[in-house]
Image (cartoon, rainbow, N blue to C red):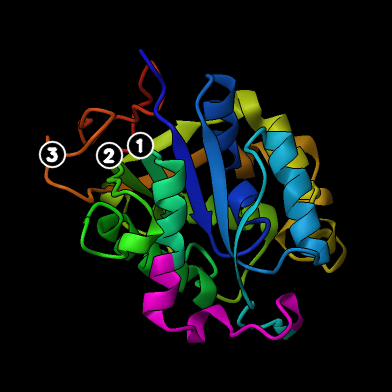
Protein backbone atom coordinates (compact mmCIF):
# COMPACT_ATOMS: atom_id res chain seq x y z
CA UNK A 1 0.00 0.00 0.00
CA UNK A 2 1.47 3.34 -1.02
CA UNK A 3 1.42 6.11 1.54
CA UNK A 4 -0.34 9.27 0.32
CA UNK A 5 1.63 12.49 0.06
CA UNK A 6 0.80 15.02 2.76
CA UNK A 7 0.92 18.82 2.85
CA UNK A 8 0.27 20.73 6.07
CA UNK A 9 -0.98 24.32 5.91
CA UNK A 10 -0.65 26.29 9.14
CA UNK A 11 -0.69 29.89 10.29
CA UNK A 12 2.60 30.40 12.17
CA UNK A 13 5.93 28.71 12.68
CA UNK A 14 5.37 26.16 15.52
CA UNK A 15 1.73 25.39 14.57
CA UNK A 16 2.89 22.55 12.31
CA UNK A 17 4.78 20.89 15.18
CA UNK A 18 2.15 21.43 17.87
CA UNK A 19 -0.90 20.47 15.79
CA UNK A 20 0.45 17.82 13.43
CA UNK A 21 4.11 17.11 14.18
CA UNK A 22 3.40 13.46 14.91
CA UNK A 23 1.46 12.85 11.71
CA UNK A 24 4.09 14.68 9.67
CA UNK A 25 6.86 12.55 11.18
CA UNK A 26 4.77 9.42 10.75
CA UNK A 27 4.29 10.07 7.06
CA UNK A 28 7.96 10.79 6.53
CA UNK A 29 8.92 7.55 8.31
CA UNK A 30 6.63 5.66 5.94
CA UNK A 31 8.30 7.18 2.87
CA UNK A 32 5.64 9.70 1.90
CA UNK A 33 6.33 13.07 0.32
CA UNK A 34 5.59 15.51 3.13
CA UNK A 35 5.70 19.30 3.30
CA UNK A 36 4.40 22.36 5.16
CA UNK A 37 3.09 25.74 4.00
CA UNK A 38 3.15 28.53 6.60
CA UNK A 39 0.98 31.60 6.10
CA UNK A 40 2.90 34.15 8.17
CA UNK A 41 6.47 35.28 8.78
CA UNK A 42 8.92 36.07 6.01
CA UNK A 43 12.10 34.38 4.89
CA UNK A 44 15.13 35.72 6.74
CA UNK A 45 13.33 36.29 10.04
CA UNK A 46 14.34 34.38 13.15
CA UNK A 47 11.14 32.40 13.38
CA UNK A 48 11.39 31.37 9.72
CA UNK A 49 14.83 29.99 10.55
CA UNK A 50 13.40 28.11 13.52
CA UNK A 51 10.68 26.71 11.26
CA UNK A 52 13.36 25.38 8.91
CA UNK A 53 15.03 23.64 11.85
CA UNK A 54 11.75 22.12 13.05
CA UNK A 55 10.97 20.80 9.58
CA UNK A 56 14.43 19.23 9.39
CA UNK A 57 13.69 17.44 12.67
CA UNK A 58 10.40 16.17 11.25
CA UNK A 59 11.88 15.42 7.82
CA UNK A 60 9.23 17.58 6.15
CA UNK A 61 11.39 19.49 3.67
CA UNK A 62 12.11 23.18 3.38
CA UNK A 63 9.70 25.91 4.54
CA UNK A 64 7.07 27.06 2.07
CA UNK A 65 6.13 30.59 3.14
CA UNK A 66 3.18 32.67 1.96
CA UNK A 67 5.05 35.59 3.54
CA UNK A 68 2.23 37.54 5.20
CA UNK A 69 2.59 39.34 8.52
CA UNK A 70 1.34 37.83 11.77
CA UNK A 71 -1.81 39.67 12.87
CA UNK A 72 -0.16 40.55 16.20
CA UNK A 73 3.52 40.89 15.14
CA UNK A 74 4.07 43.42 12.31
CA UNK A 75 7.84 42.77 12.23
CA UNK A 76 7.15 39.18 11.23
CA UNK A 77 7.06 40.31 7.59
CA UNK A 78 8.28 43.91 7.28
CA UNK A 79 6.34 45.85 4.70
CA UNK A 80 3.83 43.04 4.11
CA UNK A 81 0.13 43.19 4.88
CA UNK A 82 -1.16 41.13 7.84
CA UNK A 83 -2.53 37.81 6.66
CA UNK A 84 -6.04 38.53 7.96
CA UNK A 85 -6.13 41.82 6.01
CA UNK A 86 -4.76 40.52 2.71
CA UNK A 87 -7.18 40.28 -0.24
CA UNK A 88 -8.75 36.84 -0.01
CA UNK A 89 -8.20 36.16 -3.69
CA UNK A 90 -4.47 36.86 -3.31
CA UNK A 91 -4.10 34.47 -0.37
CA UNK A 92 -6.05 31.70 -2.11
CA UNK A 93 -4.02 32.14 -5.31
CA UNK A 94 -0.72 31.84 -3.43
CA UNK A 95 -1.82 28.67 -1.69
CA UNK A 96 -3.27 27.17 -4.87
CA UNK A 97 0.17 27.56 -6.46
CA UNK A 98 1.73 25.51 -3.65
CA UNK A 99 -0.98 22.84 -3.87
CA UNK A 100 -0.54 22.48 -7.62
CA UNK A 101 3.25 22.39 -7.35
CA UNK A 102 3.41 19.88 -4.47
CA UNK A 103 0.31 17.89 -5.60
CA UNK A 104 -0.56 16.39 -2.20
CA UNK A 105 -3.10 13.63 -1.86
CA UNK A 106 -3.90 14.76 1.70
CA UNK A 107 -3.97 18.27 3.16
CA UNK A 108 -4.00 19.04 6.91
CA UNK A 109 -4.84 22.43 8.42
CA UNK A 110 -6.50 24.14 11.39
CA UNK A 111 -10.14 23.50 12.25
CA UNK A 112 -12.83 26.18 11.92
CA UNK A 113 -12.10 27.53 15.40
CA UNK A 114 -8.41 27.85 14.68
CA UNK A 115 -7.59 25.20 17.28
CA UNK A 116 -7.63 25.64 21.05
CA UNK A 117 -6.60 29.34 21.16
CA UNK A 118 -8.82 30.57 18.31
CA UNK A 119 -6.08 32.88 17.00
CA UNK A 120 -7.41 34.96 14.07
CA UNK A 121 -4.53 33.84 11.84
CA UNK A 122 -5.45 30.21 12.54
CA UNK A 123 -9.09 30.81 11.68
CA UNK A 124 -8.15 32.62 8.48
CA UNK A 125 -5.74 29.84 7.49
CA UNK A 126 -8.62 27.38 7.80
CA UNK A 127 -10.82 29.50 5.54
CA UNK A 128 -8.13 30.07 2.92
CA UNK A 129 -7.14 26.40 2.88
CA UNK A 130 -10.70 25.14 2.42
CA UNK A 131 -11.16 27.52 -0.52
CA UNK A 132 -7.76 26.76 -2.04
CA UNK A 133 -8.21 22.98 -1.88
CA UNK A 134 -11.41 23.36 -3.88
CA UNK A 135 -9.99 25.95 -6.27
CA UNK A 136 -6.81 23.98 -6.99
CA UNK A 137 -8.81 21.37 -8.90
CA UNK A 138 -10.70 23.84 -11.10
CA UNK A 139 -8.83 24.46 -14.33
CA UNK A 140 -10.40 27.85 -15.06
CA UNK A 141 -9.41 29.29 -11.69
CA UNK A 142 -5.90 30.73 -11.37
CA UNK A 143 -4.62 29.27 -14.67
CA UNK A 144 -1.26 30.96 -14.06
CA UNK A 145 -0.79 29.00 -10.80
CA UNK A 146 -0.02 25.63 -12.38
CA UNK A 147 -1.88 22.60 -13.69
CA UNK A 148 -5.04 21.68 -11.77
CA UNK A 149 -4.78 19.27 -8.85
CA UNK A 150 -7.49 18.08 -6.47
CA UNK A 151 -6.35 16.57 -3.17
CA UNK A 152 -8.21 13.47 -2.09
CA UNK A 153 -8.85 14.54 1.48
CA UNK A 154 -8.67 17.52 3.79
CA UNK A 155 -8.22 16.94 7.53
CA UNK A 156 -8.70 19.59 10.21
CA UNK A 157 -6.53 19.42 13.32
CA UNK A 158 -8.80 19.76 16.34
CA UNK A 159 -9.43 18.81 19.98
CA UNK A 160 -12.46 16.87 21.29
CA UNK A 161 -14.15 18.33 24.36
CA UNK A 162 -13.55 15.21 26.40
CA UNK A 163 -9.79 15.82 26.46
CA UNK A 164 -9.75 19.55 27.21
CA UNK A 165 -9.94 19.12 30.99
CA UNK A 166 -7.02 16.69 30.93
CA UNK A 167 -5.00 19.08 28.78
CA UNK A 168 -5.75 21.93 31.18
CA UNK A 169 -4.40 19.81 34.03
CA UNK A 170 -1.09 19.68 32.16
CA UNK A 171 -0.72 23.23 30.81
CA UNK A 172 -3.01 25.17 33.15
CA UNK A 173 -5.98 27.37 32.38
CA UNK A 174 -5.86 29.31 29.09
CA UNK A 175 -7.57 32.55 28.13
CA UNK A 176 -9.68 30.83 25.48
CA UNK A 177 -10.23 27.19 24.66
CA UNK A 178 -12.12 26.04 21.57
CA UNK A 179 -12.98 22.39 21.10
CA UNK A 180 -15.52 20.27 19.22
CA UNK A 181 -18.05 17.66 20.33
CA UNK A 182 -16.42 14.24 20.42
CA UNK A 183 -18.77 12.87 17.78
CA UNK A 184 -17.38 15.34 15.22
CA UNK A 185 -13.86 13.90 15.51
CA UNK A 186 -13.05 11.57 12.62
CA UNK A 187 -9.77 10.18 13.91
CA UNK A 188 -7.54 10.07 16.95
CA UNK A 189 -4.01 9.29 15.84
CA UNK A 190 -1.51 7.72 18.22
CA UNK A 191 1.77 9.47 17.46
CA UNK A 192 3.59 8.10 20.50
CA UNK A 193 6.32 6.40 18.43
CA UNK A 194 7.21 9.82 16.97
CA UNK A 195 6.81 11.80 20.18
CA UNK A 196 10.53 12.52 20.62
CA UNK A 197 10.67 13.99 17.12
CA UNK A 198 7.54 16.02 17.72
CA UNK A 199 8.82 17.46 21.00
CA UNK A 200 12.21 18.26 19.45
CA UNK A 201 10.45 20.07 16.60
CA UNK A 202 8.33 22.07 19.06
CA UNK A 203 11.41 23.05 21.06
CA UNK A 204 13.22 24.13 17.87
CA UNK A 205 10.94 27.17 17.98
CA UNK A 206 13.22 28.83 20.52
CA UNK A 207 11.62 32.28 20.27
CA UNK A 208 8.33 30.84 21.48
CA UNK A 209 10.10 28.80 24.17
CA UNK A 210 11.83 31.92 25.50
CA UNK A 211 8.71 34.07 25.59
CA UNK A 212 6.74 31.45 27.51
CA UNK A 213 4.25 30.52 24.81
CA UNK A 214 3.05 26.91 24.57
CA UNK A 215 6.46 25.60 23.38
CA UNK A 216 7.91 27.22 26.51
CA UNK A 217 5.34 25.49 28.68
CA UNK A 218 6.21 22.18 27.03
CA UNK A 219 9.92 22.82 27.60
CA UNK A 220 9.28 22.95 31.34
CA UNK A 221 7.19 19.78 31.56
CA UNK A 222 8.43 16.34 32.65
CA UNK A 223 8.31 13.62 30.00
CA UNK A 224 5.13 12.00 31.36
CA UNK A 225 3.26 15.31 31.05
CA UNK A 226 4.59 15.85 27.54
CA UNK A 227 3.32 12.40 26.64
CA UNK A 228 -0.16 13.16 27.98
CA UNK A 229 -0.26 16.45 26.10
CA UNK A 230 1.21 15.50 22.72
CA UNK A 231 1.02 11.77 22.03
CA UNK A 232 -2.42 11.90 20.36
CA UNK A 233 -3.52 14.12 17.49
CA UNK A 234 -7.20 14.57 16.61
CA UNK A 235 -8.67 15.34 13.19
CA UNK A 236 -11.95 16.01 11.41
CA UNK A 237 -12.19 14.85 7.82
CA UNK A 238 -13.56 17.55 5.52
CA UNK A 239 -14.24 16.17 2.04
CA UNK A 240 -13.21 18.61 -0.70
CA UNK A 241 -14.92 16.51 -3.38
CA UNK A 242 -17.77 13.97 -3.60
CA UNK A 243 -16.85 10.47 -2.44
CA UNK A 244 -15.26 8.52 -5.27
CA UNK A 245 -14.47 11.61 -7.34
CA UNK A 246 -11.11 12.51 -5.87
CA UNK A 247 -7.67 11.45 -7.00
CA UNK A 248 -5.25 9.36 -4.95
CA UNK A 249 -6.16 7.75 -1.65
CA UNK A 250 -9.50 5.99 -1.39
CA UNK A 251 -12.34 7.33 0.72
CA UNK A 252 -11.98 6.04 4.29
CA UNK A 253 -14.85 5.26 6.60
CA UNK A 254 -15.71 7.92 9.18
CA UNK A 255 -14.09 6.04 12.07
CA UNK A 256 -10.73 5.29 10.49
CA UNK A 257 -7.49 7.08 9.80
CA UNK A 258 -5.99 5.74 6.57
CA UNK A 259 -3.02 8.00 5.99
CA UNK A 260 -0.79 4.98 6.59
CA UNK A 261 -1.18 1.25 6.20
CA UNK A 262 -3.14 0.09 9.20
CA UNK A 263 -5.92 2.12 10.74
CA UNK A 264 -6.25 3.89 14.05
CA UNK A 265 -9.67 3.86 15.76
CA UNK A 266 -11.29 7.22 16.21
CA UNK A 267 -12.68 8.57 19.47
CA UNK A 268 -16.17 7.51 18.41
Q: Which stretch did the figure color magenta?
A: 75-93
Q: Where is residue 2 in the image (x, y as percent from the top left)?
A: 38, 17
- Mark 1 to mark 3 CA distance (whole Å): 13 Å
Q: Residues within 10 Å of mark 2 (few under 14, many from 20)?
A: many
Q: Against 23, is 149 above or below?
A: below
Q: How crowded is mark 3: few (under 14 residues within 10 Å), some or many (20 or more)?
A: few
Whether residue 157 is visible here, answered yes or no, is no
Is residue 159 shown left or right of residue 137? right
Q: In which quarter of the image is the C terminus?
A: top left
Question: Which mark, by number, is residue 152?
Answer: 2
Q: Against 253, is 140 above or below?
A: below
Residue under circle 1? 105
Magenta region includes residue 187: no
Residue under circle 3? 245
Question: Which mark, by number, is residue 231?
Answer: none
Query: Under tag 3, what secondary structure?
Result: loop
Amino acid sequence: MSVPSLLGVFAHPDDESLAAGGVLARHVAAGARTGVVTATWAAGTQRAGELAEALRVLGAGEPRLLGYADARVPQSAPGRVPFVEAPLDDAVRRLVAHLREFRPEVVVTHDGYGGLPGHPDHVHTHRVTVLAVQAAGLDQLYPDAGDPWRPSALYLATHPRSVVRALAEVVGARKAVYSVPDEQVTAAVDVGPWLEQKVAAVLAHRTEVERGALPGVIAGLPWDARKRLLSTEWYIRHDPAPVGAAQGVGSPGPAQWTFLSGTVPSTR
